[in-house]
Every structure is written in C-alpha cells, then in structure tokens.
Amino acid sequence: MPNTTRSCTLAALLAAVAVCGGDAVARVFPFGPRHRAVNDLANQFVPFHARLWDLLHGRADGGLLLDWQAGWGTSFLPDYGTYLSSPLAPLVALFPRADIEYAVYAVTVLKTALAAAAMTFLLRRLGPDSAGWWAAVLGASYALCGWSLAEGTYNPMWLDGLIAFPLLCLVGEWAREGRRPLLGPLVVAVCWLANFYTAYMATLGAGLVLLVRLAATDSFRARTLGRAALTTGLGIGLAAPVLVPVFLGSRHAYPGVVRDFAAADGTDVLARLLPVTYGFATPAAFVCTAVPLLAGALLFRRDAPGRERWLWGGLCAAVAMSMQWGPTHLVWHVFATPNGSPYRQTFVLSGVLVLAAWTGLARGLPDRRSLLGGSAIVLVLAAGALPSPLLTSWSLLLAGAGLAAVAGALLLPRRGRYGLLAALLVTGTLLGQAAATTAYADRERLARLDDYPPWGPEHARRAAALAAADDWPASRTDSGLPRVAGNDPLLLGGQGAAYYSSHTPAVLTGTLAALGGGWTSRGRNLLSLDNPVTDALFGVGARWRDGAVARTDAHLPLVTVRPPGPPPAYGPSPFRNQELLLGSRVYEPPHAGACRVGTEVFLWAPEATGTARLGDHPPVHLLGGGPKRRAAMTSLGVQRVPGLRPVLPGPGELGCLDRDRLRSAVTALRARAATSIRVTPDGVRATLPPGGGTAVVAAPRIAGWHCADAEPLSYGGLLAVPLRPDRTELSCSFRPPGLRAGLGAGATAALLLLVVVVAPGVARARRRLPDTL
C-alpha cells in the first residue's frame, strides 16, 4: 500500500503540474492576463458555483429545492444534480465569494489530479507490484488526455466522469472477485451523484472492460455478471433522490434543437490522437504517446496469450469505431445527440487505451519486436492524419519526439542511472505533450468560442450596488443589462428573469416570450427583460441600468389578488399580452408609425438583427433570429417630437407606453395585494384581503408547486390559486417533480443493500449453529 500511495501521489502531482504549466505557458487565468470565461464555464458553471457558495454561507434566496434568484423563481434540485452535486464542489466555500473563479479553477485542477490518482490506483490493483512509476505515468496520461484538456477543463462537472471510470472499473473487479458488497454500490452511487451524465458513459465503458477481463481470464460466469449488475443497480438506486428529479427536470425543460449525428472525417479523428490539435466537432482522443505505443506493442507480444492481445486490441478498436456510428453514438449519449460537442464519451477510449497499455506492461517491458510493432502502429496512425487541416507542425514535432523518447527509454538497460534516465524521458514526454496541448487548447478556445468578461472591479461594484438595493421579498432587484453571463442573478445578486440551464422550464420560456422576452441558446438562456410593465408585474423595485441601480416607477408585491374569471389567454402581440396579465390597457398603437408625444416607444422585433434609433436617443442594438436567438422588447426612448418615426433594422411592432396609465393600474392592483408576505427556502406564505378571487404569485407556474386547500393554477404562466370569499391565507410549497419517487427508490435500494450485505453473514451463522450446540 505505501508503494501504491506514492504512485498515486506522483500521478496526481504530474497531472496538476501539466495543467497549470500549460495554462501558464498560454498566460491564461490565473497565470496571466487571458481569461478562461468562455461558453458555459462563464454562463453556467461559475454562476452556479457562486449560488452554491451562497447556499453554504446562508446567503442565498431560496434553498436546495427552490431558487428565488433566477428565472423569477425556478426549481434548483435538478440544477444541483446536473452541475453541483460533485463531492468536491463544496470546496468553493473555502474561498472568498469574490474569488469564485479561482475556486472553480482550483476544483478543476483537483479533479484532474484525482482522476490521475484513481487510474493509478486501479492499475496497481490490477498488478504487478513493480513498475510503480510506470503506473503513475500511465495514470497521469489518462487524466491528461485530450478530452480532459480540451473539453473537461471548461466543463468541470464532466471531470467527475473522468474520475468515475477507473473507480467503476475497480467496482467491476470487486464484482469479479465477489468482494466489497457494501463499498461497491456506495462507489457507484457517489459516481452517479457526482455527474450522472458522464457516469453513465463511464459505466458503459467499465462494463466493457469487465467483459474483456472475464473473457481474458477464463472467469466468465453469469453469476459474476449478475453480481455486477446488482451492484450497479443498487448504486444508481441510492442516487435516485437526485437522479429522478434531474430526469424529470429535463422532461419539463424547453426543448433544444434536435440534431442529426454526422461522423467526423477520418483524417480529423486520427489527427486528434496527436498532441496540440483542437476541434469542437471531433473527438479529443489525444493521450501521451507512451500509451498508444504500449497498447500497440501488446498486439505483438509473444509472451501474452493471443486471446488477451486480441480482446484488448478489439476493445480499443470497437470503442473508437462506436464513436463514429450513429446508433452507438446515441447509446453513448443517452439516446440524444447533444447540441454541443458530439464526442463527450472520448475519455472512455483514453481509459481503455491506458488499460491495454498496462496489460502489456504487467508482463514486463516489451521486447524489440513488440516495440517495433507498436511504433509502426503509432506511425501509421500519424501518417493517416497528415491530410487533416487540424494537424499542426507542433503536433508532428511533439509526437515524433515523444515516440523517439519513449521508445528509447524502453530500450535502455533497466537498472541504475539508466532506469532514472528512462523515467525522465517518459515523464518529460508526458509533461511536454500535455502542457503544450493545454496551452494550445487555451488559445483556441478564446479564439473560437463565445467569451465573457472575467470577474473584476466593475462586477464587484455592480454586485455591491445590487446588494445595497436588495429589498427581497418586498420587491425584486434585477441584475439588469448589459449582462455579464447567462446567470447574472446567481453571480451578481438580485432576483431577476435571466436564467440559463439545461433545465430551463418550458413554461418559463413560453411566458417570457409571450411578454416580449429575449433569449439565446435556443430558448434555454433567458435574458433580463427591461420593461416597465413586466417590472411592475414581477415586483421589480430596482434594476441595474446605465452603470447604476435605478428605481422603478411602480411595482406590485409578490402576491396580488385578481378578480374572479378566466385566466388571460395570450395572443401574438406581447404588448397585448402584458396588458392582459396586468388587467389594464397601458399601450397605445402608433399613428402613422409614430407614437404620441410623451409616451415611451417600445419595439418588439424578435427576428431582427441590427440597430434601431428614435431621433437623438442612443441607438439600440438588436440580436435576433430564431431558433438560436430572439431579440427582447426594448425601449427606444420617450417620444419628444410629433410624428417622428423610429429607424428600424427590419419588420417589428411598436407600442407606445403611457406611464400614467401604468401607475394607475399598479395602484388599483395594490389595493387588492397581500398585506404580508414571507418567502421560505421551499415556498411562499401570504396574508390576503378578504373577498375571494384568484391569488397570483409573480413566479412561473412550474411543475412541483403545491398549495394548501386548493390545486394551483396557471394564470398567464404564473402561479395562481383560486380563493373562497372567506379565505385570507395563502400557503404554497415547492417540491421538485420526482423527489418523492426518488426518495422511495433510494430507500428501497438502501434496504436491498442491507439485505445483500447482511444475508450472507446470517447464512454463515446458521450453518455454524449446529456445531455449537
């Protein structure tokens, strides 16, 4: 065990040094002026970790089940299970809130290091006891695969799958040996809780590895497969309290665009096996040259049984080819082609290659014949990649130098100073190739992906101003525009409409769109809607605008009472829809394309891209065009000149807002509003005026709301409850769909696990009982 500990520590250290070294070479945060805030790392993962920080420090609006800050009030447990349920995520609470980007980076590096240690532990567990530094190098090679460096580094929750694969392979070994009946399901549960998406892929890969191990060792038994299936099922069952709400959260989410899988060009696939390449729609299959060399050498080893050689070679080829075939592509991705990178399972291929390489090393270092054969395979693969435009000169240089260094190390005598030289050559190859690939990916991401400003003094000033204005639950404070990222309310504070998640509810997207809201990411990244009517309806008392917090003219409390009658039925015009939800006419139609003097001109042109202007008011830039983007309703300014028509970038609808009418409508609704309101981490309580009607909560009517004495309704997409004339109390709580079923499944799995663990001991005790009488 001490040798294993040293090997795991060395692997973790190598992984951390390579990642940090590559980022330092690229001068990327936190080692230089270039930032890491790209794509979903900035839009989702950093803001969600900021939300977790607030939860752990008791500063969040809402709790684990309900988030009052984003999307006007959304379900949080599915987001937690998708982005934050890693056992390492709470470590961000140890950092200052303003250093949340440092915290996420530190957790990312730690996950990479733990993946290296986990794979090294597995390799040492598989044997032999010698070659400890080789186990460390191969374990680190796995953690520093191209998928980890190019994809996982800005999708940090995926790195939990990188850790899960070797752990699940270890569980397979326990099932093969009939050991660890309690620990096995617990490990599976932790892996699936940490990130169910990549854990699913890791489970498929570990299952394939187990089949090869059984077939290669003549231990293929139906009982073993049953034990492995039971272990996996119990572990997934233990994770059900989170997994079931996550699954149903996806069912209730706004649908993304369905894509058809298109296999990558073969030369590009081969190019991505080499260091220093990048491509968003190709598999990042690079792994240190030592790995394919040793895996290829296994095929030519005379001291290895033919079955073992061809089973491992066949598994590597099968996993690689399965990524390029549509039906198996769907199996890897839970039967749905992802909107982003279509090769998210690539880390499994890297893991299989490492296991194949170690299988050969378990029999000792390769002889010259097998080394020559492995080198030939590496050269043939590199030659096949030559036509690819993804290939760089650094790719060929580092691959060639790495092949020469590793082959030379394997040919050196195995004792004394030559052994140390061999270790330095192989380790240097690993660190050089991984660091260079990291640096190249850092640069390419910034050039090719959307990027966002990193946290800085201006963001800190904005967050402080929002915190000073916060008056929740008496009113909302909106983080406003311009946005920093997709989840500004979580990152900056307040309780706004902006929200971006894989679980963005369809009812929220539909309601916001009906009221004139905008979006990106095909309706799952909702933008803040700066509009006086929606501010009034959703109780926004202050919002960030033009570099400062601005107070709104009039707003309603969180709960109001509307007259009896049918709920509003939305039509095509967001101006009319806002009036229906408000219950008053506040917009005037333009006359001859111009609004009346004194009214505020609003433009709704969801498909337009370009600049709109009204007279000498500042221009407004629109970015629309479905299905990916939708421009929000926007103000062009107050009409000051009679007959002045705005300049528009394309077709749109104009509405002329009368602020006096809006204030009168708000005053009338306030007369029938709640007299006291209390929000809780999982619901809302309010005292209402007598007289009956419909209580309307300014929160989306997402699935999961339950109210005392009445079934909640949808009032124009908002949560509503019918009231009897004598009813003056409102009490609603939120329970994510699937939570109760998940808790039941988890309890059942725990009971079955207890039976599985205890029953054998009871049987043994009964067999010994007659001997003691």
Image: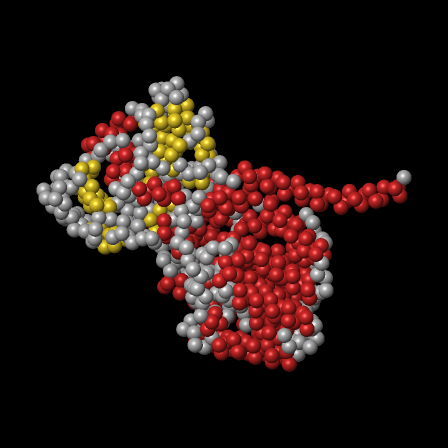
Q: Is residue 394 above or below residue 184?
A: below
Give the image quarter of residue 8.
bottom right
757 sits left or right of 742 in the view? right
Q: Residue at x 40, y 62 (%)?
A: 445
Q: Is residue 674 above or below residue 570?
A: above
How far across and down, in percent of the image, does residue 181 sit? 69, 49
The foreground one among 678 and 590 is 590
Which residue in the rendered view is the most extreme toward the top? 726
Residue 367 in picture, x, y percent from top left: 66, 79
Image quadrant in which the C terminus is located: top right
Q: How is the image coloured?
A: secondary structure
Position of residue 212 relative to residue 762, above or below, is: below
On-image quarter of the N terminus: bottom right
Give me the residue at 59% from left, 65% from top. Answer: 352
**Between 109 and 593, which is closer to the camera in this rendering?**
593
Q: Position of residue 677 (x, y in %)?
A: 39, 28
Q: Judge from the rendering whether residue 515 lies leftward or rightward of residue 766; answer left or right.
A: left
At horizontal 54% and vertical 67% (from top left) the residue drawn is 320
Q: Position of residue 402 (x, y in %)?
A: 53, 75
Taking 754 as reference, is 606 left or right? Answer: left
